[in-house]
Amino acid sequence: GVSLEAGHKVAARVSEAKVEPAEWILSTVQSVQGNKYLVSDDDDPTGATVHTLAQSALIPLPLTEPSIFLRQHEHKEGSSVLAMFPDTTCFYKASVAVAPSKRRERDYMVEFEDDVDADGRSQWRRVP
């Protein structure tokens, strides 16, 4: 697994383990205390909202963006992913609709679960 250190960005599951749907937020590791991680909510500019979580409740996010994007490194169309909903710091389950290699852009088009318009149709959203 990835070694998480202070400053590492993660998707953090802040809801109880058996609660569905799970609540995932963008967080930053503040410190490591044994097998627990103190993470701050990136949506709180004061840094006062913190959670103490096990590593199993954290998904490390990439530290850097690749200089070259290759098809074999991207999520395939139809893949289930956790993606950050546009203009928020919350992650939700989604399905890849169009991969970056098909768009000539670095972003994915995804379809979030339970994201429908007034007519009940789901829509694709652009996410990094």
Image: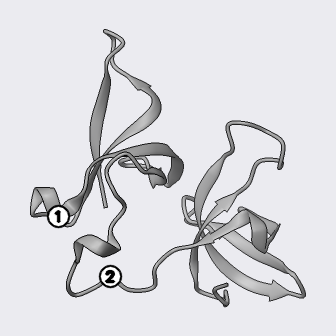
Decide which of tag 1 and tag 2 comes sooner along the chain: 2
If the image is split into quadrants, where does the N terminus sit? bottom right
Q: Quadrant of residue 73?
A: bottom left
| Residue 63 coordinates in the image, percent (x, y) | 45, 85
Q: Residue at x 90, y 87 (%)?
A: 34
**Along the line of sight, which residue is nearer the eye, 80 or 35?**
80
Number of labelled discs? 2
| Mark 2 secondary-structure assignment | loop
| Residue 29 coordinates in the image, percent (x, y) | 66, 79
Name the colour scheme.
one colour
The mark lying in front, picked from 1 and 2, is: 1
**Along the line of sight, which residue is nearer the eye, 41 or 60?**
60
Q: Residues within 10 Å of mark 2 (few under 14, many from 20)?
A: few
Amino acid marked by disc 2: Glu
| Mark 1 secondary-structure assignment | helix
Q: Residue at x 25, y 56 (%)?
A: 99
- For the question of whether residue 48 can be seen, the reply is no
Which residue in the rendered view is the most extreme toward the right?
34
- For the question of whether residue 71 can be seen, the reply is yes
In the image, is residue 2 above or below residue 113? below
The mark found on residue 113 in the picture is: none
Separation of marks 1 and 2 at Cα, in angstroms: 15 Å
Left or right of 4 on screen, residue 74: left
**Along the line of sight, which residue is nearer the eye, 77 or 8?**
77
Left or right of 100 on screen, residue 92: right
Q: Quadrant of residue 66?
A: bottom left
The mark found on residue 65 in the picture is: 2
The mark found on residue 101 in the picture is: 1
Amino acid marked by disc 1: Ser
Q: Residues within 10 Å of mark 1 (few under 14, many from 20)?
A: some
